Amino acid sequence: MTAGFYSLGGSSIVIENLADQLSKQSIDVTIGALQFKRIPPDGDYHVMKLPVYNLLKLKRIVEGFDIIHNHHPITNYLALVSRKPFIYHYHGAPDFGRGIAFRFSMLLSIKIMKRSFGAILTVSKSGVAELASSFSIHKLYVVYNGVNTSLFAHKPERKFRKGTPQFLFVGNLYAHKNVSELLFALKKLIKLYPKAYLVIVGEGDGSDNLRNLINELNLQNHVSIVGHVPHHELPYYYSSSDVYITASRCEQFPLPLIESWACGTPVIASNIPAHLALLKESDAGLAYEAGNVSSLVSTMAYVYENVDKYSDKGLAFAKNNDWSLVAGRVKKIYKAVIEN
């Protein structure tokens, strides 16, 4: 199971959970990366740094496996030194690779290497549409991201409660996450709910700008940016909040949605294709018109007042996509790719 630069992020969480659950299903898994900015936690899988500067050694290593399951576009080029079945797992990208770096690493790698792919996995149906818009690709499978329902479950103590109603955002604070829209909506919402509060879990390039905006809008008593949170503490943040909320403009299957549902917390999300599809299938929240702050405010008020309508549905969706079940679906794809 290969990656480029292994760091804290959604794809790394997917890799670790798949590796862990596939290992429990009698598959010998190794996580290999060009560089580890973060080492995967201990598990029943192996971890190795790929010797990219020694092609003969790299070829011997990859030829020792029955299948290569790759998660990052830059490591699609491993198919050049491997004759073994090769799967590319498409997690999405901001603006679908229209920036220069993404054009090289993602679009070019798919264009050059697509004939080497035994299959492409996407985490959503909108991912299929993105790929089909630029490439003629077959052997596409949709495999939703999963959640560890043993870890992510409702915590009744609500130890991170700050206000009423309380909203939560979890994610890297990048421009395409559009967290500022949440602040503008909150400014209006506190006219309806004077104790309304937003907790922002995450860090990134946009954190300083968000803190400045909080001060400009005089929201210091209604917002907190808590930075990075250990994975085992996230269920307490979801459970302490009434609604999870995201204004992101570019997503395929953001993990916080299913983590929220596993904790019984409904979701409000911008009306991009991936969010719309997930909300329709789960029936565990509502979409709002992206860029329309008034639409967001009214949706926040409605979902908060009708939380019980969504909680059980979100939990059912999460249980149907526990990582153990998702790994079983991936294992069937492995079998089909190897047989073909």
Image (tube, rainbow, N blue to C red):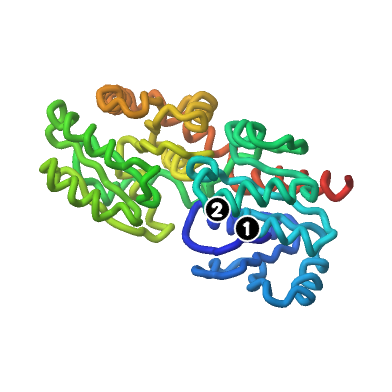
Which element carries disc 1, helix, strand or loop?
helix
Task: Identify the amino acid type marked 1.
Answer: Ile
Q: x, y (%) of residue 50? A: 67, 71
Q: Quadrant of the N terminus?
A: bottom right
The quadrant in which the C terminus is found is: top right
Q: How many marks?
A: 2
Residue 224 vertical placement versus 261 (above, below):
below
Give the residue number, with chain letter if any, for mark 1: 74
Which mark, by number, is residue 331?
none
Circle 2 crowding by C-alpha within 10 Å: few under 14, some 14–19, many from 20: many
- Direction front: furthest residue: 100
At 73% from the left and 55% from the top, the residue drawn is 25
Mark nearer the N terminus (1 vs 2): 2
Identity of the residue drawn at 36% across and 25% down: 288
Q: 102 or 218, which is in the foreground?
A: 102
Type of the residue with mark 2: Ser
Marks 1 and 2 sit apart, C-alpha to C-alpha, by 14 Å
Residue 300 x %, y %? 29, 28
Using residue 45 as the reference point, say whether residue 297 is left or right of it: left
> Is 80 situated left or right of 121 in this image?
right
Residue at x 52%, y 45% (from the top left corner) = 93
Tell me if label 1 and label 2 are in contact, CB under 8 Å: no
Residue at 26% over, 27% down: 293
The secondary element bearing badge 2 is classed as helix
- Residue 201 or 140: which is nearer the viewer? 140
Q: Quadrant of residue 33?
A: bottom right
Q: Which mark is residue 11?
A: 2
Q: Position of residue 96 (x, y in %)?
A: 54, 41
